[in-house]
Image: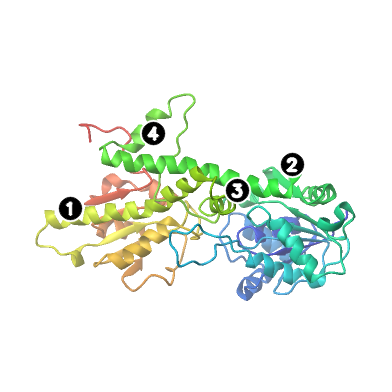
Amino acid sequence: MSFETISVIGLGYIGLPTAAIFASRKLKVLGVDVNENAVNTINQGKIHIIEPELDAIVFKAVQQGYLQASTQAKPADAFLIAVPTPFKASDDACATPEPDLHFINQAAQTIAPVLAKGNLVILESTSPVGATEQLAHWLKELRPDLSFPQDVADDADINVAHCPERVLPGKVVKELVHNDRVIGGMTQTCSERSVELYKIFVDGDCIITNSRTAEMAKLTENASRDVSIAFANELSMICDDLDINVWELISLANRHPRVNILQPGPGVGGHCIAVDPWFIVSKTPGKAKMIQQARQINDSKPAWVLAQYKQKLDELLSEAPNKIAEDITVACLGIAFKADIDDLRESPALSIALELNQLHQGKMLVVEPNIEQLPNEFDEGATLSKLNDAMIEADIVLLLVDHKPFIRFDIKKINVPKLIDTRGIWTPKQVFNGK
């Protein structure tokens, strides 16, 4: 085996599970992160994120001496970069978001001093097309004494490739092992060495392509889902205007053998589907028209949900003239970006709750079973609450995330004056009297 030591740069939702899985295969793994708290937590055999099965794997790997975390890079045979790729800040709300690669640049600066001939560098971060080549360019500038694929192809001292993660939060440990991997090397040798590395733990197929196609493959997967979700979200807004139960409508339409409409929601969140399509748009703004429109539809859905809240509030106040807005209690159920996880990144539910925190003049209850305290962005008007308490006390309930405890809750036992069910878990699919 040509890989005995692995270094993973970035110990977040992808980096830490990847490091832990390699370590579970009895390889020496050094995880590197700028977050000292995360580093200290991992070195205690604990984890700083919520992911099923991961805690036990990390604990055992640390106890056996195969996994260590640090804020400094050390020599290794392979370096995997799993850092965020956010957008650049912009004052123009109408401008197309532009990818921010400074974390990848920082990762290059971190590993460059310890690179040695024969090393393999893999970019796992979801990236715009051309990011892997940019990484290789930065490394060449930092280490002119070494050769890279863009100059000498298969004769390079350092091999560089792109291999995007393709896992679902909540199932990361299982899917890292069993899912197929797309391997995009800058040369054939880069790809073959990357396959050799991933085959240490990957049971799925490792399919070789070039780095640009590998980058685009991940973006295409998520853009495709985004377009499908946008159709469902747009349909839900149309049905509201036409007084049609969208959940029943989709259920009926999906009985067609060649139709599979997704379920609408309060928007699209997370670090992938809500972000990746913009990487395509930023590279080809004149061509990616459907992709851009889908993004705009999904990004507009939280505002539509807030409009539903305002409508319910007006209804309540008109039905009870003796009450004012300060007397009304509102509850938001769920602020994570998807069900049964603690990840709040790019969460439409969180953005809705934060906006509501500013809009609502009365008491606000937030139910999120996967966190222990509300993010600092909330002011004192919002309180983290238990589900039963919120359902009893609230006058308006916004169901924003389909967490399992919400699905199991018997809504028939509670008389909620006004319910906004953005996930359709409490809305009957079969309706009567045309309502």
Of the image marks 3 and 1, the number of the one nearer the N terminus: 3
Query: Residue 32, can we see it?
Result: no
CA gap, disc 3 to disc 1? 43 Å
Answer yes or no: do the residues labelled 4 and 1 have beta carbons within 8 Å?
Answer: no
Please indicate whether residue 165 sits to the left or right of residue 355 in the image. Answer: right
* Residue bearing the label numbered 4: 250
* Residue bearing the label numbered 3: 219
Disc 2 crowd rating (10 Å Cα; few below 14, some 14-19, many 20+) is few
Name the mark nearer the viewer: 3 or 1.
3
Rendered view: 188 above or below 256? below
| Element assignment for label 4 | helix
The circle on residue 315 is 1
Measuring from the top left, give residue 182's x and y in whole percent.
71, 45
Answer yes or no: do the residues labelled 2 and 1 have beta carbons within 8 Å?
Answer: no
Measuring from the top left, give residue 214's x and y in whole percent.
69, 47
Quadrant position of the C terminus in the picture:
top left
Amino acid type at image mark 4: Ile
CA gap, disc 2 to disc 4? 35 Å
